[in-house]
């Protein structure tokens, strides 16, 4: 039994999901509240773009012929999710870098002089800063495509655990948004978010407790949605797909992936965080410690989910 | 006019001469394997083993019957490997599905997409290394068949189980043989590959149902529902935008407009 895709791909699927999911969550909160939390998309982009770049590097490392990676960008093949994914990754990272530059340029007052060279550069790109509003929407579309592609990549194959299963992209999107939200919570609650906010000229104030409460409830609901989709995915495989699909589920539930599945995905990634989130919300006040703990566990759970699905899918 | 390989599994005797001929003609090294309790060897197709005989033991009326299946690339008309290849390195040339060895990046996507598990990265065995490289598989011995010779496996088969020629002719011969088998009491005999995936260029005369040999009864084109898969992910994102985000944060939107914004 030879694994074609190994840990590089596990990590990649995980961090690409986190990056896209974090931007999605941040954009949603900021846009729905009519721009009340402009620091959120900035934090998500500032952390997400390096994650996407690191993931792309892992993808190249996983290739059999690394030096030929550029061949990916000589074709645009709508039917090949990997081709589409390569372009999505490239555009997402490039656009993210442009947005970071524009946000940063906007943080300067027009007449302000800090370091001459840098402020000079900022003043050059500053006129374009208004475009960041439009770019943020395009980046949202790319983020949705990015997290969807990580699932479609696997479902457009013929492995029993992945092939043609429509709920697999749904599962990966749910997990991506859930882990992305968890990353945002970690960044905001450890002060890193404020740091990034100040870097872009903000005041670095933390979120009001009412907002944190909503964030906590969101995390809870995202976890529940992921749990429902996961159950649906397994039931679909067990009862509506081929005999091979049913034995693929057995690999997860009772086979060589069962420890990662039950311990990692279900317990660490879903049940414990859900209980923690539920308990901390009962008091109406978001409890810092349990929010940090559950966010960390959700992030870990995302890793276990990618490992169970990616490695388990190659073990049937 | 496309050629095809007709494989009469009712005539195959499991000598595995085709495996050896394939290795010799295509200059593929042997694999280091251990006896795992069967004459079947190596255990799987790989980047350096492009054809192999799969042995299946079937108990019928208290008698054990051996079913032999010559595995390898089917050169499908609707080739999943070609569909998913991100660089276009896997492509059709007439009836041949070939991997451009200078263009393949070794991503392994075709390996996961193939419904017959017939394409593999040259990883494991070459020179004992563990490096992953480009994808390789049966080429129908294109260097022979474009020069009027049959593929090496066909040439060597001592049982007369393999034939190479015009596809329509092979289908006619296959159907004839199936009819003969059915007349002889093999009620489940059938011809596999005439219609699967737009028509395979390996046609099998099977003495039993495809699943008894381990062949997928209805092989699936890997990207047949790819549009719906994209939609599934995008719709999920849409649902999440509504619940929890819109439902939970729209309250702050209302407050803000009452306060007149800041």
Image: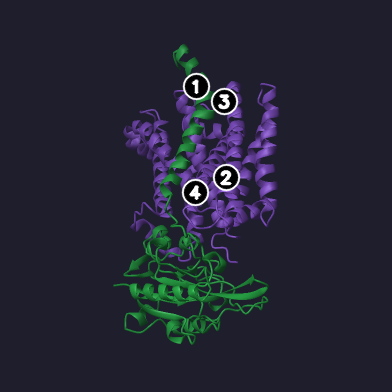
Chain colours: A purple, B green
For label 3, the residue is: A207
Dividing the picture into quarters, in which one does residue A301 lie?
Answer: top right
Q: Are marks 4 and 3 in contact (CB under 8 Å)?
A: no
How far apart, in angstroms, are the residues tagged by discs 3 and 2?
36 Å
Mark 1 and mark 2 on one chain: no
Tell me the residue at 51%/62% (across/down): B216
- Relative to A91, is B183 on the left or the right? right
Mark 1 and mark 4 on one chain: no
Answer few, some or many: residues within 10 Å of disc 3's Cα (few below 14, many 20 plus, some between 14 and 19): some
Q: Nearer the viewer, residue A17 or B137?
A: B137
What numbered label is drawn on residue B250?
1
**Residue A119 point in image, percent of width and height:** 38, 36
Q: Nearer the viewer, mark 4 or mark 3?
A: 4
Which mark sits nearer the N-terminus, 4 or 3?
4
For label 2, the residue is: A233
* Residue B116 shows in this picture: yes
Name the element at disc 1. helix
Which mark sits nearer the N-terminus, 3 or 2?
3
Q: Nearer the viewer, mark 3 or mark 1?
A: 1
Q: Are marks 3 and 2 in contact (CB under 8 Å)?
A: no
Q: Nearer the viewer, residue A148 or A6?
A: A148
User: Pointer 4 indicates a residue of which chain?
Assistant: A
User: Pointer 1 indicates a residue of which chain?
Assistant: B
User: Pointer 2 indicates a residue of which chain?
Assistant: A
Depicted A97 relative to depicted B12: above or below: above
How far apart, in angstroms, are the residues tagged by discs 2 and 4?
16 Å
Tell me the residue at 38%/53% (across/down): A79
Q: Nearer the viewer, mark 1 or mark 2?
A: 2
- Relative to A282, is B43 on the left or the right? left
Q: Nearer the viewer, mark 3 or mark 2?
A: 2
How far apart, in angstroms, are the residues tagged by discs 4 and 3?
31 Å
For label 4, the residue is: A150
């Amino acid at each position: 039994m030879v694994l074609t895709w190994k840990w590089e791909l596990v990590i990649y699927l995980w961090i690409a999901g986190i990056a896209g999911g974090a931007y999605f969550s941040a954009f949603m909160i900021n846009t729905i509240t009519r721009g009340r939390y402009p620091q959120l998309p900035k934090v998500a982009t500032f952390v997400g773009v390096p994650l996407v770049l690191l993931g792309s590097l892992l993808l190249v490392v996983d290739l059999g012929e690394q030096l030929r990676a550029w061949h990916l960008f000589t074709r645009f093949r709508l039917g090949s999710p990997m081709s589409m994914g390569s372009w999505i990754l490239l555009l997402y990272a490039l656009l993210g870098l442009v947005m970071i530059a524009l946000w940063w340029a906007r943080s300067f007052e027009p007449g302000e002089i800090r370091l001459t060279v840098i402020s000079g550069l900022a003043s050059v790109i500053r006129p374009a800063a208004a475009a960041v509003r439009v770019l943020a929407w395009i980046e949202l579309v790319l983020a949705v495509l990015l997290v969807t592609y990580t699932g479609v990549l696997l479902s457009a194959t013929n492995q029993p655990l992945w092939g043609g299963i429509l709920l697999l992209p749904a599962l990966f999107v749910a997990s991506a948004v859930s882990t992305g939200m968890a990353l945002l919570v970690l960044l905001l609650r450890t002060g890193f978010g404020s740091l990034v906010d100040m870097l872009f000229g903000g005041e670095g104030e933390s979120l009001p407790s009412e907002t944190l409460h909503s964030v906590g409830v969101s995390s809870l609901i995202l976890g529940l949605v992921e749990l429902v989709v996961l159950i649906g995915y397994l039931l679909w495989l067990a009862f509506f797909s081929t005999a091979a699909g049913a034995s693929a589920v057995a690999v997860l539930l009772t086979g060589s992936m069962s420890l990662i599945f039950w311990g990692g995905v279900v317990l660490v990634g879903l049940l414990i965080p859900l209980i923690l989130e539920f308990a901390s919300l009962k008091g109406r006040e978001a409890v810092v410690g349990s929010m940090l703990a559950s966010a960390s566990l959700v992030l870990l759970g995302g890793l276990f989910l990618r490992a169970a699905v990616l490695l388990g899918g190659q073990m049937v | 006019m496309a050629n095809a390989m007709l494989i009469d599994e009712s005539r195959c005797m499991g000598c595995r001469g085709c495996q050896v001929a394939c290795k010799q003609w295509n200059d593929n090294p042997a694999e280091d394997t251990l006896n795992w309790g069967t004459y079947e060897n190596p255990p799987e197709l790989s980047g350096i083993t492009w054809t192999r005989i799969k042995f299946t033991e079937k108990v019928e009326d208290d008698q054990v019957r051996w079913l032999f299946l010559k595995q390898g690339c089917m050169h499908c008309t609707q080739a999943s490997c070609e569909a998913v290849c991100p660089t276009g390195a896997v492509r059709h040339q007439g009836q041949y599905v070939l991997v451009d060895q200078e263009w393949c990046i070794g991503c392994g996507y075709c390996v996961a997409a193939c419904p017959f598990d017939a394409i593999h990265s040259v990883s494991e065995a070459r020179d004992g290394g563990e490096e992953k490289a480009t994808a390789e598989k049966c080429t129908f011995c294109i260097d022979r068949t474009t020069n009027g010779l049959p593929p090496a496996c066909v040439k060597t088969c001592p049982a007369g189980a393999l034939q190479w020629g015009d596809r329509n002719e092979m289908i006619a011969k296959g159907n004839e043989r199936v009819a003969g088998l059915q007349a002889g009491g093999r009620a489940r005999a059938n011809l596999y590959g005439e219609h699967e995936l737009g028509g395979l260029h390996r046609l099998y005369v099977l003495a039993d149902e495809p699943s008894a040999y381990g062949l997928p009864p209805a092989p699936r084109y890997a990207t047949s529902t790819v549009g719906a898969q994209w939609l599934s992910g995008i719709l999920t994102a849409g649902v999440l935008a509504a619940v929890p985000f819109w439902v939970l944060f729209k309250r702050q939107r209302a407050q803000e407009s009452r306060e007149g914004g800041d």
